[in-house]
Image (cartoon, helix red, strand yellow):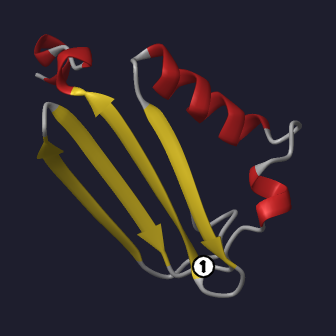
Amino acid sequence: MARHAQATAVHIRLTRAAGRLVLEVADNGRGISAEKMSDVESFGLLGMQERAAAMGGEMQWRGNLGAGTTVTLTIPEAAVNPTVLL
């Protein structure tokens, strides 16, 4: 985040609702444009989206130029292997 977003603060929230885990990461960086979010050559974003989909989840990005970006990952709880977390 510091490298791409030039953020000075990051807020992270992990919640559980209706059998799904929701991870939200928000920064106060320079934000991301709609064009960048939909850029097929943006391999970092594409890779995150593919990994989320492989677990039955989804990634969402909300960006406000000059006001930061929020990334939300939602996955089924069943996709999490508790032995990996130990």
Q: Amino acid at mark 1?
A: Gly
Give residue 29's quadrant in the image: bottom right
Label 1, on which residue?
Answer: 29
- Which residue appears farthest toward the bottom when viewing the image? 66
Q: Position of residue 9 (x, y in %)?
A: 43, 79
* Residue in the foreground of this view, choosing between 19 and 10: 19
> Does 51 sit above or below residue 11?
above
The residue positioned 86% from the left and 37% from the top of the image is: 40
- Give the left or right position of residue 42, taking residue 52 as reference: right
Q: Residue at x 47, y 27 (%)?
A: 52
Closer to us: 2 or 73: 73
Could you tell me which secondary element the residue under label 1 belongs to? Answer: loop
Where, by quadrant of the figure, is residue 17 drawn? top left
On screen, residue 33 versus residue 78, left or right, reads right
Across and down, in percent, residue 41 comes to 89, 37
Q: Residue at x 12, y 17 (%)?
A: 82
Q: Residue at x 30, y 62 (%)?
A: 12
Image location (x, y in percent) of residue 65:
72, 81
